[in-house]
């Protein structure tokens, strides 16, 4: 999923270049940068997660969840596209997004993948936290046996 997100984000960044005028808004361009960073950080974490402690794994998953959630949330906030609006004519969107309407499916897919990766990071974080904190029954200490 991270690889798919990386492909979608890098494709849009490659098409738009470094000029903010090539994007619907500066916020959208900067959100693509956040998502690109998060993709790269996630892939580096995947490579090295076996070599770090459980506590650091939990912390890294928390950080990745924050970044995935931020990227998905900003994309949700700035983009007028939804899965059922991609077949509408570009004139239905505001002027900034009308020229970008041919990228609707990619933007919707990026948002969906970012939310899914956010959820996966949260589940991994709490799963590792539950694994780290060991719950087991205690011996009955009120009765002394000799």
Image (cartoon, rainbow, N blue to C red):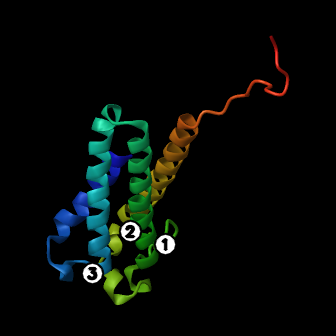
Q: Which numbered marker is on residue 60?
A: none
- Which of the two discs, 1 and 3, sits closer to the camera? 3
Which callout, 2 or 3, points to the residue nearer the camera? 3
- Res 85 label: 1
Question: Left or right: where does residue 134 sit relative to residue 105?
Answer: right
Residue 100 vs 60, above or below: the answer is below
The answer to whether 103 is drawn above or below residue 55 in the figure is below
Q: Position of residue 143 (x, y in %)?
A: 85, 22
Can residue 109 be seen at all in this image of the molecule?
no
Extreme-bottom residue of the structure: 95
Is disc 1 placed on a helix, strand or loop?
Answer: loop
Counting from the top left corner in percent of width and height, residue 49 is at 34, 37
Q: Earlier in the sequence, mark 2 or mark 3?
A: 3
Find disc 3 in the rendering and name its residue: 26
Instruction: Answer with left or right where residue 77 lies relative to residue 28.
Output: right
Label pair 1/2, CB-CB below 8 angstroms:
yes
Res 144 seen here = yes
At label 2, counting other C-alpha atoms closer than 10 Å, the crowd grade (few under 14, some 14-19, many 20 or more) is: many
Q: Nearer the viewer, residue 21 or 116?
A: 116
- Give whichever of 91, 63 is nearer the camera: 63
Mark 3 crowdedness (10 Å alpha carbons): few <14, some 14-19, many ≥20: few
Neighbour tally class for label 1: few under 14, some 14-19, many 20 plus, Cα within 10 Å: some
Residue 106 sits above or below residue 134 on the image? below
Q: Secondary structure at mark 2?
A: helix
Q: CB atoms at circles 2 and 3 under 8 Å apart?
A: no
- Label placed on residue 104: 2
Query: What residue is shown at x 30% (from left), y 65% (from top)?
Result: 34
Q: Position of residue 33 (x, y in %)?
A: 26, 66
> Mark 3: which secondary structure?
helix
Residue at 43% across / 37% down in the picture?
Answer: 54
Percent coordinates x, y for residue 140 in the rendering: 80, 25
């Amino acid at each position: 999923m991270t690889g798919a997100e990386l492909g979608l984000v890098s494709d849009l960044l490659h098409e738009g270049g470094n000029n903010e005028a090539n994007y619907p808004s500066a916020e959208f361009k900067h959100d693509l940068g956040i998502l690109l960073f998060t993709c790269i950080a996630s892939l580096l974490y995947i490579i090295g997660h076996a070599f770090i402690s459980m506590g650091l794994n939990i912390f890294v998953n928390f950080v990745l969840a924050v970044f995935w959630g931020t990227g998905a949330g900003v994309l949700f906030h700035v983009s007028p596209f939804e899965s059922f609006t991609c077949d509408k004519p570009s004139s239905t969107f505001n002027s900034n997004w009308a020229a970008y309407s041919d990228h609707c499916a990619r933007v919707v897919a990026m948002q969906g993948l970012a939310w899914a990766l956010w959820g996966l990071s949260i589940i991994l974080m709490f799963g590792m936290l539950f694994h780290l904190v060991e719950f087991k029954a205690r011996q009955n200490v009120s009765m002394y046996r000799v």
